[in-house]
Image: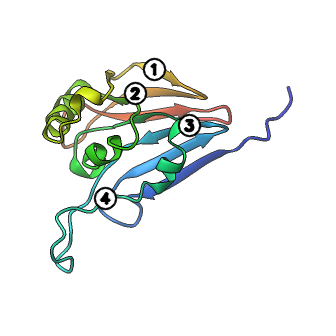
Amino acid sequence: MAKSKKKLKVIPLGGLGEIGKNITVFEYGKDIIVVDCGMAFPDDEMFGIDLVLPDTSYLLKNKDRIKGIIVTHWHEDHIGALPYVLKDINVPVYGTRLSLGLLEYKLEEHRILSDCNLQTIRAGQTIQLGAFKVEFIQSTHSIADAVALAIHTPVGI
């Protein structure tokens, strides 16, 4: 078997070294998936700022390559930026019933719910998104219906 020269790229756009703005890009070849899409709340020094969004300019530049956004659970730091991102990047969003149910209210508030493609998954399910096979694993968290992910790629899990 010939070894592929393609590499898996894992690109955190937020959430490392900070609380909030959790968003990670997984890229292999021409395929991209995004895990979570959160926001942060301003600190005491950020006068006049209501919320802090991650820098998604990389996603905008590559929006035609994005196979979907996967949300692991409903907390604002993991899902709160979705209404802002989905206005510019209309891709399917995969999440559990509770996560997507709560997201629907937020998308409705932003008047974009009817334009969004929400795909309900359940723990134990596996989906294929381009080069990625994503396995949803039941997880215990401070909110119900959270999942962990096993992301199967051509170079490993």
Q: Which residue is mark 3?
A: 65
Q: Nearer the viewer, residue 4 or 90?
A: 90
Q: CA distance from mark 3 to mark 2?
A: 22 Å
Q: Which residue is mark 1?
A: 126
Residue type highlighted by circle 2: Phe
* Left or right relative to 19: residue 110: left
* In this view, the mark in front (3 or 2): 3
Question: Dot 3: within a 10 Å radius of its alpha carbon, few (fewer than 14), some, or many (20 or more) residues?
Answer: some
Q: Residue at x 48, y 28 (%)?
A: 134
Q: CA distance from mark 4 to mark 2?
A: 26 Å
Q: Residue at x 41, y 32 (%)?
A: 91
Q: Which residue is mark 2?
A: 136
Q: CA distance from mark 2 to mark 1?
A: 6 Å
* In this view, the mark in front (1 or 4): 4
* Residue 62 higher or lower than 55, as above or below: above
* Left or right relative to 27: residue 154: right
Counting residues from the N terminus, which is met first, the one under dot 2 or under dot 1? 1
Q: CA distance from mark 3 to mark 1?
A: 20 Å
Q: Which residue is mark 4?
A: 53
Colour pattern: rainbow
Task: Kindly indicate whether the residue at mark 1 contacts the one at mark 2 (C-beta within 8 angstroms).
Answer: yes
Residue type highlighted by circle 3: Arg
Question: Helix, strand or loop at disc 2?
Answer: strand
* Left or right relative to 34: residue 110: left
Q: Residue at x 51, y 53 (%)?
A: 58
Counting residues from the N terminus, which is met first, the one under dot 3 or under dot 1? 3
